[in-house]
Image (tube, grey):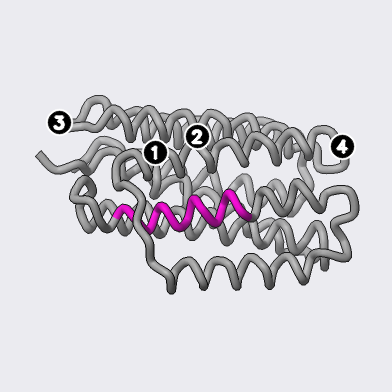
Amino acid sequence: MKTALYLIPILAVMVFFLIRAEFRQNQRQIYSLKPLTTLLVIAIAGLSFSVTPMNPTYTWGILIGLTLSLGGDIALMFPTNQKAFRLGLGLFLLAHVAYAVTFTLLAGLQFHWLAAAALVAIGYGLYARLRNGLGAMQGPVIGYLIIISVMVYQALATFEGGVFSVYQAWLVFCGAGSFYLSDVILAVARFWKPFQYHRISLAFYYTGQLLIALAASYFNP
């Protein structure tokens, strides 16, 4: 059994308490639990260094993305601070770039018109819904939508190229999809229609990060 798997129950407990702290608006717990939970995902990715074989390109690429995500998590703990929000958005955008580049370096550039059309349609539909509430954030949000869509598209490319096993490709693709869904929930709550249960996005966010990190431990001999 892969060593990284032993950390998943701990991660699940931490995410549960983090979501509970968010609902209770317990800022002290949020300030400690959120960075620690992301650090645990970083540890899960880092454990791939103890696995034989491992792919350094994938592991280092994902670690860069997770480290940027950690910075984004910390910045977004202050949602009412516009500068902090922009910083968090920028750091997560760079995290998606790191993931997309990593997937591309290993799986190459693939073209699937149906997947591309679906992502464009989803992205445009989301933008059309959010547009009236974006204000000065219109440009950054459009850029973010493009980058995260490219990241998901390149995650799909891991099914081809022969570097990733089918199991790994599913981990990467489902992880990217969960990450995308978490961002959609947050965007809807912030720019269109605030709702109490948007905090559940954290479950999708950490599921996505976990699956992408876990894939590092499953390269075939």
Dot in front, 1 or 4 = 1
Label 2 SS: helix
Pick the residue in front: 110 or 131.
110
Q: Which residue is mark 3?
A: 52
Q: CA distance from mark 1 to mark 4?
A: 32 Å
Q: Earlier in the sequence, mark 4 or mark 2?
A: 2
Q: Amino acid at mark 4?
A: Asn
* Residue ID at (14%, 43%): 220
Q: Which residue is mark 4?
A: 81
Q: CA distance from mark 3 to mark 4?
A: 45 Å
Q: CA distance from mark 4 to mark 2?
A: 23 Å
- 134 left or right, relative to 6: right
* Residue ID at (61%, 54%): 146
Q: Earlier in the sequence, mark 2 or mark 1?
A: 2
Q: Quadrant of the N terminus?
A: top left
Dot in front, 3 or 1 = 1
Dot in front, 2 or 1 = 1
Pick the residue in front: 23 or 105.
105
Q: Amino acid at mark 2?
A: Gly
Secondary structure mainly formed by the magenta segment: helix
Q: Which residues are magenta?
A: 146-158
Q: Earlier in the sequence, mark 2 or mark 3?
A: 3
Q: Earlier in the sequence, mark 1 or mark 4?
A: 4
Q: CA distance from mark 2 to mark 1?
A: 9 Å
Q: Pointer 4 and pointer 2: residues touching (CB < 8 Å)?
A: no
Q: Is residue 71 above or below residue 13?
A: above
In magenta stretch: residue 152: yes
Label 4 SS: loop
Mark 3 crowd level (few <14, some 14–19, many ≥20, 10 Å Cα) = few
